[in-house]
Amino acid sequence: MRITLLLFLSTSLASMEKPTPLHQAIIAYQAAKEQQNSAEEQKCVTEAQKYINAGQFLEDRYQGKTPLHEAIFANAEDIAEQLIQKKVDLNARYKDHGHWNNVTPLMLAEFMFRRETVRKLIDTGADTKLADDDGNTVEAFKNQYPC
């Protein structure tokens, strides 16, 4: 049992240290978008779609973020929509132990002004009543950080 636990911990720690291929595709998408390289953006969406369709890495974390959190940060609406349609955990908490204190994808989307993603998350069942570690609900994110 001890060996199994140690193996689990080392595997979990290793997966946290480097991005999954799905996270890599989303991160590359963000870089392509910043460089206004639409061909590369599409290539990244296609790459991400491959992993999403296969059900791979959907709930894995990199630097505390699930792929849905990563897609919201990257403003990768197509990828975020695919993840939402795949029924990933819409209430997963971003665990970075810093500025983002246990925020959900809905809170993050509201903060980042991703209105279409906010609508899709709510329509698909994201919990609007959850609070982060500071007691902020999605409504607080909307009201504290207006456009």
Image (spheres, rainbow, N blue to C red):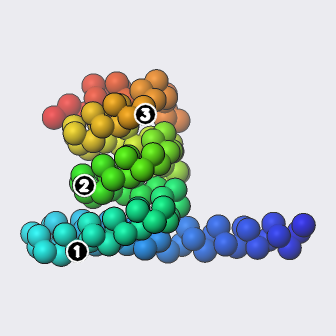
**Label 1–label 2 contact, CB within 8 A:** no
47 shown above or below 74: below
Which of the two discs, 3 and 1, labels the residue nearer the N terminus?
1
Residue 85, image x and y in percent?
37, 46
Disc 3 versus disc 1: distance between alpha carbons? 29 Å
As shown in the figure, which amino acid type bears the numbered disc 1?
Answer: Lys
| Image quarter in which the N terminus is found | bottom right
37 to the left or right of 109? left
Residue 91: assigned label: none
Where is residue 139, by image quadrant?
Answer: top left
In this figure, which residue is indicated by the disc labeled 3?
A: 126
Task: Write the residue at 46% across / 65% down.
Answer: 54
| Image quarter in which the C terminus is found | top left
Disc 2, SS: helix
In this figure, which residue is indicated by the disc labeled 1?
A: 43
Category of crowding for the residue at label 3, using alpha-carbon neighbours closer than 10 angstroms: few (below 14), some (14–19), many (at least 20): many
**Label 3–label 2 contact, CB within 8 A:** no
Task: Write the residue at 89% across / 68% down.
Answer: 2
